[in-house]
Image (cartoon, coloured by chain):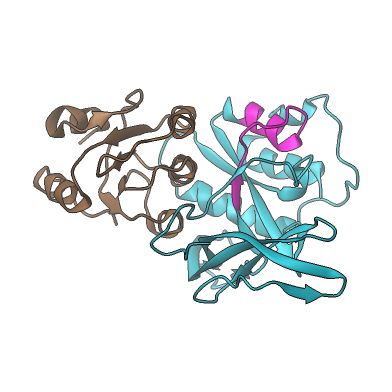
Amino acid sequence: MTLRYCRGILNSISGPSTSIFTHKGTIPAGIKGARMSRDKCNHSWTMTDVKYGFIVTEKCYHCNLVRTYFTFEEAPPKEEYKEGAHYWNYEGSAQSIKFNMRCGQCSKVVTFEDLMGLMQCMACDEACHVNIISQICEAQNIWVYAGLAYKSGKEIDLPAEKLDVLTTYFTSRLRTPGKKILVLPGSLRRNPETCRGEILKDVGMVSLTPET
Amino acid sequence: MTVRELESKLKFKPLNQIYDKEIDGAFISDMVSDVMAGAKAGNLWVTLQTHKNIAAAANLVDLAAIIIVRGKKVPEDTLQMADRAKLTLFATDEDTYQVAVKLYEAGIKPGK
């Protein structure tokens, strides 16, 4: 995924003269594809099917692999368990939500079962594409959030159409003139394992999150 | 009512610069996920949460300001994040109920 996708989506909300992708940073490997073509409906998205659950982080102490998943269980599971060659141990959790988007005009539903959360860049890595794009965009009052998605414990990118839906939806909720939201793929982070971006979740909700 | 009028009328203590915006209703929750799902642009958020992602969430939804109740100490990185998002944070020793009553009496209704 795809700087080209980002260029397309930014052009659509900011006009083709936007210059953020003329930055001379390294373009990430694996660029392919462009954003999906638009439907004929001029969608008006609303958040639907909101369900509360927990984002759980676990770590294999044999190979130090860290992975994250979402659970709808009443409390995050903390038991160590073996899966293949890995011994997974509970690292932490925070309450969050899952949701889908429904178009109020054509009733189309876009599901976000793989979306773990939205992350705002904290500028921890000067060479990270999310940081570079964030800094340039913020000067234009465009606020960048990375849509982090996981499938079977592995991080994946949301399809371009879904990133587009999130961008459109959150931008449509704004009131401040000129302000926009841009949701980018998580793979634009240079190093997800050391990324210190702020994921929007209920950190420190000790009344709801059982103590570790 | 604007954020600046809120400060002068109800005497909540600003923790950072005042970014004057029009207030359109109040939203009370201690869950960031509630704000993402249910708050509306222009709402005034009342919470006891102080983590910096309250500013990230408020910015995503375009809230007018945040009131942090019960005298919770607000970390420096939360204030920095709020300034980055041009979002005013207020503090008060009062609890959520007392703040809600004050807001209601000042004409700020539940955010919808």
A212 or A176, nearer to the observer: A212
Which residue is farthest left? B105
Residue located at (80% from left, 55% from top): A64
Mark yes or no: residue A148 visible.
yes
Residue located at (83% from left, 24% from top): A24
In which quadrant will I find the C terminus of chain B? bottom left
Residue B43 vertical placement versus A114 (above, below): above
* Residue B38, x across and y down, in percent: 39, 59
Residue A76 vertical placement versus A173 (above, below): below
Instruction: Give the letter of the cyan chain.
Output: A
In which quadrant will I find the N terminus of chain B? top left
* Residue A77, x across and y down, in percent: 60, 73
A194 or B45, nearer to the observer: A194
Instruction: Give the letter of the brown chain.
Output: B
Along the horizontal axis of the image, is A18 left or right of B59? right
Along the horizontal axis of the image, is A61 left or right of A55? right
* Residue B63, x across and y down, in percent: 37, 42
Residue B80 in magenta?
no
Along the horizontal axis of the image, is B96 left or right of A69? left
Residue located at (64% from left, 33% from top): A134
Mark yes or no: residue A111 visible.
no
* Residue A103, x across and y down, in percent: 53, 66
**Res A8 quadrant in image:** top right
Residue located at (32% from left, 28% from top): B15
**Res A113 quadrant in image:** bottom right
Along the horizontal axis of the image, is B8 left or right of A46? left
- The magenta segment is A118-137
A198 or B65, nearer to the observer: A198
Residue B62 vertical placement versus B81 (above, below): below
